[in-house]
Image (cartoon, coloured by chain):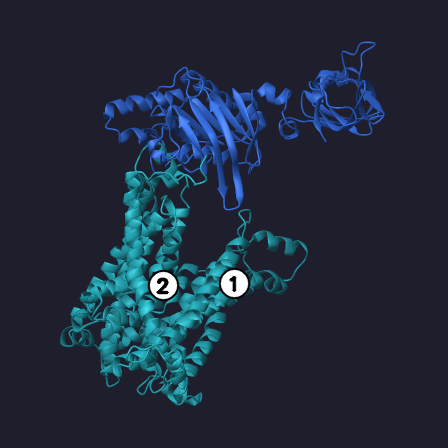
Amino acid sequence: MNGEGSGKYLELLGVSKTFGSFTALRDIKLAVAQGEFVCFLGPSGCGKTTLLRIIAGLETQTVGLVHQAGREISRLPPAQRDYGIVFQSYALFPNLSVFDNVAYGLVNRGIARKTIGTRVAELLKLVGLPDAGAKYPSQLSGGQQQRIALARALATSPGLLLLDEPLSALDALERVRLRQEIRSLQQRLGVTTIMVTHDQEEALSMADRIVVMNQGAIEQIGSALEIYREPASPFVADFVGKVNVLAGTVEAGGLRVGSLLLDCDAAGKPVAGRRLRAYLRPEDIVARPIAAGDSNVIDSRIEKIEFLGSYCLVRVSADGLGQPLTVYLSLNFLSELNLAPGKQLKLRILPERLRLFQA
Amino acid sequence: MVAIAIRQRTDPRDRVGHALLLVVFLVLVAFLAAPLAALLVQAVEDRTGAFVGLDNFIAYMQTPALAQSLWNSVWVAAAVTLATVPAAFVFAYALTRSCMPLKGAFRTVALTPLLAPSLLAAISFIYWFGNQGVLKGAMQALGIAAIYGAPGIIISEIFAVFPHALMILITALALADARLYEAAEALGTRRMRKFFTITLPGAKYGLISAALVTFTLVITDFGIPKVIGGDFNVLATDIFKLVIGQQDFQRGAVVAVFLLAPALLTFAVDRFVQRKQTSMLTARAVPYSPRPSRGFDLAMTLYCLAVALLMLAVFGMAVYASLVKFWPYDLSFGLKSYTYGLVDAEVNSAFFNSLKLALGTATGGTLLVFVGAYLSEKTRGIEWLRPAVHLLALLPMAVPGLVLGLAYIFFFNAPNNPLNGLYHTMTLLVLCTVVHFYTTGHLTAVTALKALDAEFEAVSASLKVPFYRTFWRVTLPICTPALLDISRYFFINAMTTISAVVFLYSPDTKVASIAVLNLDEAGEQGPAAAMAVLIAATSLAACILYLGLGRLVERKTQKWRNLK
């Protein structure tokens, strides 16, 4: 497929989908570059799977156009599009051997048997299961089945790889392992990939760009870091990662929350007197370093420590703030200072990390 | 952007599927919807074809003899229902909730009535209690003067419909969540209380369904009242007399509408109940497995033994009577009844017709049902057609055989119908039987297809493999066990059915079950019993053959299931 080098391998132009009076997707505009790995992230029912299925031609948009590799594919049936797809259920053919599953799309293309054999062996090696050919899907673990489904989808060298929640049926360990495998495989092959997921960790760790969706619309498109550090909306801030929400008003000199006046340098400061919500990640409240003269230093009392491993989620009540805060503190730090519920702790809110949204 | 919704182009290969689905739809329209419409039209027209509204119904109700038949049908069906459902419930309870031995054997024996035409029971009871019956004296001592009439119909129907009620109740009782019983036990609940607070409410829908099915089967059954009914008239025999005897098609149509009513009600309630029943048992339920309890298990064993012995007595009597030389004067054994029936009465041709009908239905019906179910469940496009096909596939369950047969006369015997040439042919008999038993086959196919991953077709399309190739390589092999089930169901029902075909056969296409009826009518009891037994034996042989075929298929196409 051509389209190499163009910034838009796949382009969605104002795609909407309605079911009766229900709007599943509203005016989706998106361009995906050649070789890019894009994640559709959102809660269930946000329309991300519908959007993937529209790209696949398994559903039809009500309005809007889809371009792939310079070709308008809006009205083409699935069989006339160019993609491979992996479903959450794997959808491996249970009565066919792994070899036959992987070869499924190759057989009816008039390719010589020997070539098919070589290609399947190559694909099985690619997904790390070189000896699985003679087995049946039921003899494989979930993760192995998913690798075979991936091999089958890649067998015909499609220009686009679509992954519909491919990891959500797997256990936690297998999921993390396969995440990295899929990502490195994708990078090696350079195949443009779209993955649907509701797991933010998955999206943050795998994607070049993340499309955060909510109620049928795109909330934000950006890299993992952008999405995390600069959420474009309260929804994104809330959905991706943990967040403290502070209700306040803008005054001359800063943001008034409770009896505290916080220093805050969020871009485009809103008008004074406006009621706002400030969004703040737990790691943006630090216990050190705190230098003398630093702004935004608050005294707090530890209320609860939730052990998460090397890090702990610590709930503190801050003097004058009028609401509790959640903070990440390392286990080492906690034990070093011998911190426990009831103890006092000085914390600093990083002014550059406060994100303000209209209340 | 224009406001017109985008429509996807259709892949040329998908058009094959659309065309085939359209064919299935047209078959169902031509052989189900159109005949039924013809029947309904007939019921509101007079002999000249003028619209008369409900006049036919009013005239019917004002004919005392016919109104009496309506009442007879209703109370006999009600009596059979009241007797059968509790009896079958206890039997099903024993099979699902006790630890009695020989469950498989009991179950098999209880299902044997399905192998023969329902009238086999009537013939057998005549041998037991009829004019020359073995136990006539004992019956009269109980105050029943003669078996012919209501007593005979009721007792024969109980035997004939028992397996139908049993199967529904086994399904209902098998769906039990062990956690409820464990919770009850933890609270110190007694057995009786557990039964009334957990078991019975859980089986409520099954009981309703079993009662309605029993009632409908009895009220629409033709064979039993014909054989053992004597002068006791019921709707099913009336319809036959009116149409075949008096050529009074309008009144026949009116009676058909009366028969259609309970069947439609049953159908509607059953659909509702099915939905309730499935929602009751969640995926997290833990299947219940009974624990041994000596007294209870013994009582259940004795009960099932008694029922099984009664069943075998009925079946055995038919076999015995078919083998004696001349009932009741010469009780030595001989094959005279068989040779007479097959050779002198020329039932051999009827028997081969039955085999033809059964084989045609078992192959053609399975093909139509499965292809129809597959295309409507698994392909995309022509969305408007799918609900219509689904509705037409479910409708036959609501149409009694007699009604369907009558509808076929009205539709196919009409001289201006281009399909008129089919009338009296074996092809029409096969199509009628396929349609008659379509629903169960369709539901079996749909269940099997729904068990497959919904994305097989999507994956195939993405790999540019046409749907028919995936159907052939994946769907069909996986579904072969279900296919065999459907085929066996068609075969046995085609062997034993009377109700629809009784209106449609010609001398050349007479089938064995009808021959039994004719022999009985001619007073040839022995040969009638012999032919009924022959039908049952054929059904049994078919069952065994299907079992063997199932094993073979299992080895060929299902080996992936048991790998580890």
Binning the other alpha carbons within 10 Å of mark 2 as few (below 14), some (14 to 19) or many (20 upward) gives many
Q: Amino acid at mark 1?
A: Tyr
Chain hosting mark 2: B
Q: Amino acid at mark 2?
A: Pro
Q: Is residue B4 left or right of residue B518?
A: right
Q: Is B209 in front, or is A254?
A: A254
Instruction: Using the rendered view, name the quadrant where residue B196 is placed.
Output: bottom right
Q: Could you tell me residue B65's position as x and y percent?
A: 38, 88
The circle drawn on residue B396 is 2
| Quadrant including the C terminus of chain A | top right
Which colour is chain B painted?
Answer: cyan
The residue to which callout 1 is attached is B205
The local secondary structure at tag 1 comes to helix
Q: Is A126 in front, or is B190?
A: A126
Binning the other alpha carbons within 10 Å of mark 1 as few (below 14), some (14 to 19) or many (20 upward) gives many
Which colour is chain A painted?
Answer: blue
Residue that appears at 64% across and 62% down: B190
Chain hosting mark 1: B
Q: Is residue A78 left or right of residue B83?
A: left
In front: label 2 or label 1: 2
Residue that appears at 31% across and 22% down: A119
Q: Could you tell me residue B144's position as x and y percent?
A: 42, 88
Residue that appears at 30% across and 67% down: B35
Q: Is B146 in front, or is B426?
A: B426
Q: Could you tell me residue A356's position as x and y percent?
A: 71, 24
